[in-house]
Image (cartoon, rainbow, N blue to C red):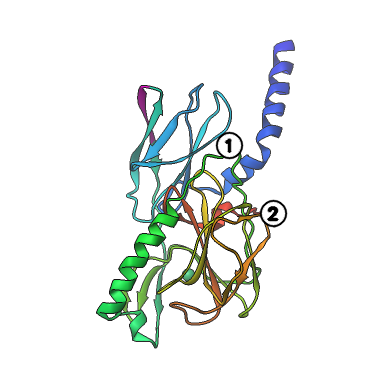
Amino acid sequence: MKNNLLLIFFLALNFSCQATQAQTVDTMQSVPGGVAIIDLETEEKPNVFFSNKQVMVIGSPGQWQAIVGLPLWAKPGNHELILKSGINTTTKQFTIFEKQYEEQYITIKNTEMVNPSSSNLERIRDESGIINQAKAARTELAEVPLQLDLPVSGRISSPFGLRRFFNNQPRNPHSGLDIAAPEGTPINSAASGKVVNTGAYYFNGNTVFVEHGQGLITMYCHLSEILVEEGQQVSRGEILGKVGQTGRVTAAHLHWGVILNTVSVDPTMFLNNEE
Ligand SMILES: [Zn+2]
């Protein structure tokens, strides 16, 4: 009896410590474009890798969890994490489940945005190097804000993961969430973090990248105006810029991306459902 009471007490204590994390965990799914939460069952905190990229690890001794971003092109089935602790290397298996995403057909009047000329292709190639670097930003933070706020309030005009066709030609799937809002609407940082890159890019238009710790990055695209600078520390809700229609767009909106271990994942998995 005494043991049972002790156990209940322990579980209650444990639950209250992890309540905020558990909320987020509930919304996450191990699917292509999703986030896998994997119990590591190690006493010491290991460095964990998926597809050669270091992944986020949160928790406490004996209760470490890997929070793994899964690319949209990931194959459903069994996958493996590499755990490194000192000189020891072990593996941990996990499963990615299937998910079907809808198709979307978009008509773009400016054909340079669908079939760019060779000089623009060169610019796009140069920019993708810079963008990939921004997506690989990573600082070691023990406390990572896994709960993100929607950066602007507005109608979701296009969800994450749609298989896209521009003027009937297949292109990369939709890597973020589109929120329709009037031009000039302030954009609030989804959580506290550091501005790791700002730039004016061909497809993404005026863009801001914020890193929140351990490779969790939010990306804000098509801005009319950028109001922060690279290297700047921002707090949750701080204004980063304004909604616009720069880059490849059909109307003013915010394209909001969430990146984890360099891959774009579904931003809705980080939103608090109770809002
Ligand atoms: Zn978008």
In this picture, residue 72 sits left or right of residue 119: right
Quick one: which residue is furthest to the bottom in this view? 109
In this picture, residue 210 sits left or right of residue 168: right
Q: What residue is rendered at 67% in x and 28% in y?
A: 14
What crowding class fits label 2: few (fewer than 14 Cα within 10 Å), some (14-19), or many (20 or more)?
few
Q: What residue is rendered at 62% in x and 57% in y?
A: 190
Quarter residue 130 falls in: bottom left
Residue 218, x across and y down, in percent: 53, 57
Placement of the N terminus among the 4 image quadrants: top right
Numbered disc in front, either 2 or 1: 1
In this picture, residue 141 sits left or right of residue 35: right
Q: What residue is rendered at 57% in x and 63% in y?
A: 229
Residue 78, x across and y down, in percent: 34, 39
Residue 17, x across and y down, in percent: 68, 33
Q: Which residue is mark 2?
A: 274
Is residue 91 on the magenta stretch?
yes
Quick one: which residue is furthest to the left in this view? 118
Say which mark, if any, is on residue 142.
1
Residue numbers of the magenta segment: 87-93
Query: What type is the residue that disc 2 sits on?
Result: Glu
For mark 2, give the secondary structure. Answer: loop
Is residue 73 on the magenta stretch?
no
Q: What number of labels is visible?
A: 2
Mark pair 2, 1: CA separation: 25 Å
What crowding class fits label 1: few (fewer than 14 Cα within 10 Å), some (14-19), or many (20 or more)?
few
> Is the residue at mark 2 in contact range of ligand 1, meaning its CB lies under 8 Å from it?
no
On screen, 140 above or below 265? above
User: Can the viewer see residue 1 in this picture?
Assistant: no
For mark 1, give the secondary structure. Answer: loop
